Amino acid sequence: MKVPGRSNQDDLPLVSIHIGGVFTSDEPTIVRTVLGSCVAVCLYDLEKRIGGMNHFLLPMGECRNTLPTSYGVFAMEELVHRCIDLGAQRGNILAKVFGGGRVLQFPESEKSVPNANIKFAFDFLESAGIRVATYDVGGVDAREIFLFTDSGRVLLRRVVVQKDLPTNKKLPEDGTLRYL
């Protein structure tokens, strides 16, 4: 798979994560995910050139038939610990937060799934003393993001969701690519 807007990424491995995924690396790697109401948090230490990403479905829940890291409470702890295990210094770690879009028919309220995910991510980062460098959350669009673990840069592409689109059709893109 090619990273949009890039022609020289062939020398970097590309890893895709999905709900419950957590990936960290101290080697230059591109980490990709697609988000609707889920949230992904990217952490990176520029000094040590260590970075990682998680992708969670809900802030909390029971882990009966799903990966524990499908829940923010576990996904965030796992991401922070993996970065530190690779040598990141907690005081140098910065965060970028993405997702929490109202792509499904969620009622607009503070307790909706997208808003609960967003609030959880920011509350966790604040309590962990991790500064948020940037974020792109909420709204009605899905997002495709690519994290470059060695620089902390994130390429963001918005994906416009059409409500009556057959499930076997590719979602249209609005063409917007941004580095954050």
Image: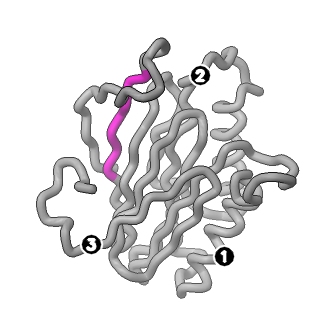
Q: Nearer the viewer, residue 165 or 11?
A: 165
Instruction: Pick the quarter of the image with the N terminus.
Output: bottom left
Q: Amino acid at mark 1?
A: His
Of callouts 1 and 3, the N-terminal one: 3
Q: How is the image coloured?
A: one colour
State how far apart marks 1 and 3 are (Cα). Answer: 24 Å
Label 1 crowding class (10 Å Cα cut-off): few <14, some 14-19, many 20+? some
**32 on left or right of 70:** left
Label 2 crowding class (10 Å Cα cut-off): few <14, some 14-19, many 20+? some
State how far apart marks 2 and 3 are (Cα). Answer: 34 Å
Q: Which residue is mark 1?
A: 81
Q: Which residues are magenta?
A: 155-161
**Residue 14, located in which quarter of the rendered image?**
bottom left
Tell me the number on the disc at residue 12.
3
Secondary structure of the residue carrying numbered label 1: helix
**Residue 54 visible here:** yes
Q: Nearer the viewer, mark 1 or mark 3?
A: 3
**46 on left or right of 38:** left
Of callouts 2 and 3, the N-terminal one: 3
Q: Nearer the viewer, residue 148 or 12?
A: 12
Q: Residue at x 68, y 69 (%)?
A: 78
Q: Amino acid at mark 2?
A: Leu
Q: Is residue 138 above or below residue 23?
A: above
